[in-house]
């Protein structure tokens, strides 16, 4: 029996063959076109999906306006929440809308006392700032640093490690490999060794690759010469 292709983005599971979306064990109601929009976005996660391409893919033989797509995205927002929808908007190149959703989510979290998610919301904001057509490096560093500080203050190791990993990747891209190494070493040192989470495994794998990268740069660097 051929296994069914499914996409997992916890706590959600998209099953396109059976045309349904699950949240844990709960089947969520979705209109066919909304499901098709979600499927296309999930298939191209992390890529820029132009709005025109999305409209032509989901409505290939019909001329529809932007309002139809907005309705579908609104339905997804209701079901998935602001953070997941922000990713969807970012994937379609609508960074301003995505960032506005995350700002709204942070405000709601603060007002409702849901400070547990605040650090992760700041981290996602920083990541989205880097995915814009013109990345805002300064604000991204501010958001990621704030996420790291907030998670550390709240002793939320998973959020702290996620923020550190995102910030370390940015530091490496900026040519600051040593600073990235120091950051990850410091956070992993405080992270419980018994916590074999996905985040810890990812951080350790990245740390190993980064160490090799930094070593190769230093070994291959020309020797500094000084005037006598």
Image (cartoon, rainbow, N blue to C red):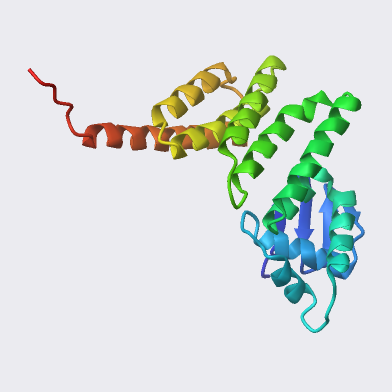
Number of numbered discs on residues: 0
Q: Is residue 180 left or right of residue 58?
A: left
The front one of 104 and 200 is 104
Quarter of the image where one finds residue 21: bottom right
* Residue drawn where x is 79% and y is 25% of the image: 116
Q: Is residue 9 visible?
A: no
Whole-percent x and y of residue 208?
A: 41, 34
Whole-percent x and y of residue 51?
A: 73, 66
* Residue drawn where x is 39% and y is 27% of the image: 178
The front one of 226 and 190 is 226
* Residue drawn where x is 77% and y is 58% of the image: 14
Quarter of the image where one finds residue 149: top right
Quarter of the image where one finds residue 155: top right
Toward the front, the furthest residue is 227
* Residue drawn where x is 70% and y is 32% of the image: 122
Image quarter in which the C terminus is found: top left
Image vertical order of residue 66 relative to residue 195, above or below = below
Whole-percent x and y of residue 159?
A: 67, 28
Q: Is residue 224 visible?
A: yes
The front one of 104 and 30 is 104
Image vertical order of residue 96 relative to residue 193, above or below = below
Q: Is residue 19 left or right of residue 203?
A: right
Image quarter in which the N terminus is found: bottom right
Toward the bottom, the furthest residue is 61
Whole-percent x and y of residue 181?
A: 44, 27
């Amino acid at each position: 029996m051929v296994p069914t292709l499914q996409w997992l983005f916890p706590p959600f599971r998209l099953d396109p063959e059976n045309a349904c979306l699950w949240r844990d064990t709960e089947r969520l109601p979705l209109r066919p076109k909304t499901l098709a929009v979600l499927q296309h976005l999930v298939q191209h996660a992390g890529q820029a999906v132009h709005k025109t391409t999305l409209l032509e893919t989901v409505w290939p033989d019909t001329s529809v306006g932007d309002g139809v797509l907005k309705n579908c995205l609104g339905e997804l927002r209701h079901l998935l929440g602001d953070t997941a929808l922000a990713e969807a908007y970012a994937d379609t190149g609508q960074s301003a809308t995505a960032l506005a959703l995350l700002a709204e989510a942070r405000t709601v979290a603060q007002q409702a006392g849901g400070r547990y998610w605040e650090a992760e919301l700041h981290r996602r904001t920083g990541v989205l700032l880097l995915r814009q057509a013109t990345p805002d490096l300064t604000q991204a560093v501010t958001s990621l640093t704030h996420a790291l500080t907030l998670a550390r203050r709240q002793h939320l190791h998973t959020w702290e490690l996620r923020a550190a990993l995102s910030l370390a990747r940015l530091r490496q891209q900026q040519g600051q490999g040593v600073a990235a190494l120091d950051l990850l070493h410091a956070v992993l040192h405080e992270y419980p060794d018994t916590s074999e989470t996905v985040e810890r495994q990812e951080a350790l794998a990245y740390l190993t690759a980064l160490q090799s990268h930094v070593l190769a740069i230093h070994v291959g660097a020309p020797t500094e010469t000084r005037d006598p």
